[in-house]
Amino acid sequence: MTDYKDTLNLPKTELAMKANLPNREPKMLDYWESIDLNKQIRDSRKGREKFILHDGPPYANGEIHIGHSVNKVLKDIVIKSQILNGKDVPYTPGWDCHGLPIELNVEKKIGKVGQKVTAEEFRDACRKYANSQIDIQKKDFKRLGIFGNWDKPYVTMDFSFEANIIRSLGSIINKGFIERGEKPVHWCVDCASALAEAEVEYKDKISHSIDFTFPIENELINKAFGTNVKDDCFVASWTTTPWTLPGNLALTVNKNFEYCLVEFEMNSKIANYVVAKDLIEQTLERLGISNHKIKGTCLGQDLKGLNAKHPYLERSSLIITGDHVTTEAGTGIVHTAPGHGLEDYGVALENGLEVLSPVKSNGTFMEEVEHVSGMFVFKSNEKIIEVLKENGALLADAQYEHSYPHCWRHKSPLMFRATPQWFIGMTNNDLLKTAKESIENVNWEPEWGKSRMASMLENRPDWCISRQRSWGVPIPLLVHKDTGQLHPETSRLIEEVANLVEEKGIDAWHNLDCSSLVNEADQYDKISDSLDVWFDSGVTHACVLNDSEMQFPADLYLEGSDQHRGWFQSSLLTSIALNDVPPYKSVLTHGFVVDADGKKMSKSIGNVISPQKVWDSMGADVLRSWIASTDYRNEMVVSDEILKRSSDSYRRIRNTIRFLLGNINDFDYESDAVEIERMTQLDKWMIKKTKSLQIEVMNDFDKYQFHQAFKKIHNFCANELGGFYLDILKDRLYTSKKDSEARRSCQTALYFILEALLRWISPVLSFTAEEAWQLHKPGSPSVHLLEWFDEWSDSKEEMTITDEEWNEVLLIRAEVNKVLEASRNKEVIGSALEADIDLFCSAEVKTILNKFSDELRFVFITSDAQVYDFEEKGDSTELEGLRVAVKKTKHDKCERCWHSREEVGEISNHPTLCERCVDNIEGDGEVRLFA
RNA sequence: GGGUCUGUAGCUCAGCUUGGUUAGAGCGCACCCCUGAUAAGGGUGAGGUCGGUGAUUCGAGUUCACCCAGACCCA
């Protein structure tokens, strides 16, 4: 007996069902590396229109977390889809390298500057540390399958980059955006220097705790409180730093608090005092007062704008409001010295107050300060208290122990002292105004990015770009010791320093003897401040996009939504200052990764999912499909279950590819392809559907709607292919004559579909697309060199079966399936091939179904399908004009094709076969026109 | 507390701009079939009343107000 199974054309492929991505992907990376794929891609697009996605530099510290993965994979999908569009996409990833977190980590290892190491040694260690972190992160980014110029990333601590940061600063200075301002910082009188946040230690200290008063006119008070008091009125305040009183310019209240006018007797004098309602008890206790009367109450905002008088100086103290005022201690009215406190400084700026700082760098008061002229500030407390007493402004004086900042080196208490800092002025040359206007010309994705940006720019204070840090790009300026003016040759100085830095790094400035560069250097102070690291990253557009490979402005910036305040804004401001236009045409933002409950990921809660674990257990392509299937504009939820789902949908796509590959295994497109005019109707229709889907997919990629594209691709595999086309096709592929037109027709279609599909998935499932491509086109270097598939020819003739008719067939097929299922449940049939069906149709339906002639049964995958005029026979369906009767076949099953046909058993030399199988084995093969 | 957003089946997403038939899809799940895509494939089916309350309207997932929960950025 012949083994007819050998006469079948069964699928054959090396694409394993089990993906085994964790093992396979690293090998693919090696392959890509070995053929220098990134270079090949660039070469292949030489001279094409460019697409510039400018990378926001991650901070070079620590292993990448899932948020980094999301960010870089989204960028990678954009890049790969633009390559498919045929564009030249030079993507240079970057790293942000200066700044505090690295300093802190290096301090842990080798100690602080000035203790065990010199500043130069310290900076060198920072550089080495940052490099090691870049290596770690780079390895992981590559493992994710991110394509780009990994051999030459931009690194903000490269000497040339540091030099370009300085040059950018120089341009911004030349254009008049920089101004010097005063801002309070921690100041150590022993160091005679500002301290960085990290150099501050908090220790307990005993200070004075004084209650004191600001006189205020009765008229103002009566108006605010709606009272009519005649005795003297005062605003009560409290402080632990009496020495800051010479710097007092204001009193801050909380606009939402209730304040009372309290009458009591002090030093045998009856007077009225303003105190926050919730603090009356505490305050009176400090004062030792037992009797009081409340004369009136008002809200903090009612006090705003009133002028009190300084306790002992001939000037006023304005009442302002601020949210930092609490009811934890004091009187609820905060003595505000803008030069001596950060919060004081903040509210002072908001209210247009001067930043008064009457203290010199050695910690003594300036000569003009009354009562304490030339006195050391911490020694002046007693004197101030004495003066308060003399002026009748002191209510109480006590000892008070509290946590207080100290110098980490000298262990001495610190003060807040306003010191010169460098600012980019928001009103200079209408910087902020221009920035606000310019965001109208940027394409914000999602759209609300614009309003978010606008509201963040709204109350933007001047940008303080100076830091008192070791590991940062220096602000290479000389300031005249007496006048405070910049050196007249500043512009040249900066350029020369930049050239030195380009050669030797940032130490060049610290080691520089400025007299070698400019005249009269000895009359100038050499600024030792460094730049805010946000300035570093804020000028990456100037340092990276000016390269001849690149283009300014960038087509796209793509970062998390935290960057509206961060990088998007710092880049915008510097670019407006330097170029008058934003550095980007489009800004795309993604949300943050949260857990299944929508909570943010944190180590302490223990809900962190590590990307490393995901690619080690499931593969980078699974992680990538999660990213591609999630709407990144909102928070992105990830959990084990969700990743499992991603893995499931990945498998569906993979198996579809596997089926396609397996069934065109014996197909050579050059010699076997069937012209579109000669293809069966079904194959033509599927090619048409595939083409139209490709347009949608391309469009979704262009609109950055990756989750839509991915869903469509997945649904195509599951519905159009798995549930319909491929299922129907199995009969033709397996049983028809190997090189018959019937079989080659659908193989041509499968070939087109595979070619298209592998490109569609390549931006997302980059590894799998390549794996399949290599099996499909051995010898072709990479799927990632391709553009969208466009080789399917159009049929010139009308299709015999129209789209509308096919859609009707789909509906009919669904109804047939329901009836078949009912029969299956009644155990009439098992597989559909055990059934013969009769379709009772209205004239309209009949016209459609008759077009299929005797090929109709293949559409339903039944052994027989007959069309009759509509009659009340069989089962009713949801479609009007269609009833279906299912009966178990009376005929024998063909051993080869499994269809049960009348003639089986009647063909003498093949008694177990049907007629068409005999034709397929011995004859010319069956002809298929429709399905 | 403020700004910018989000909240539709177990999961991921459509629908909401331009209010109007039984709110859709895929996955998962259940059951069945197949054993020539087989740690695959096919079929059928059960799951939401649209975060909550109220308002506008003949009619609201879709408009408005408030509330709740969550995210980011501030305070």
Image (spheres, rainbow, N blue to C red):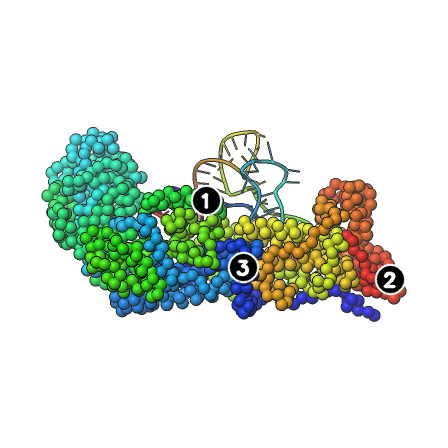
Q: Whole-percent x and y of residue A71?
A: 48, 56
Q: Whole-percent x and y of residue A746?
A: 73, 57
* Distance between the alpha carbons at the discs numbered 1 and 2: 77 Å
* Distance between the alpha carbons at the discs numbered 1 and 3: 29 Å
| Residue position for label 1 | A441
Amino acid carrying mark 3 in the image: Lys
Q: Whole-percent x and y of residue A402?
A: 23, 54
Q: Which mark is residue A37?
A: none
Which residue corresponds to the image point at 62% horizontal and 50% vertical from the top-left?
A695
Which residue corresponds to the image point at 65% horizontal and 52% vertical from the top-left?
A691
The front one of A749 and A177 is A177
Q: Most extreme residue toward the left, as rendered?
A: A390
Amino acid carrying mark 1 in the image: Asn
Quadrant location, the N terminus of chain A: bottom right
- Crowd rating for badge 2 (residues with CA inside 10 Å; few <14, some 14–19, many 20+): some
Pointer 2 indicates a residue of which chain?
A
Which residue corresponds to the image point at 82% horizontal and 45% vertical from the top-left?
A868
Q: Residue A46 carries which label?
A: 3
User: In which quadrant of the rendered view does residue A432 lie?
Assistant: top left
Pointer 3 indicates a residue of which chain?
A
Amino acid carrying mark 2 in the image: Gly
Secondary element at image label 1: helix
Q: Earlier in the sequence, mark 1 or mark 2?
A: 1
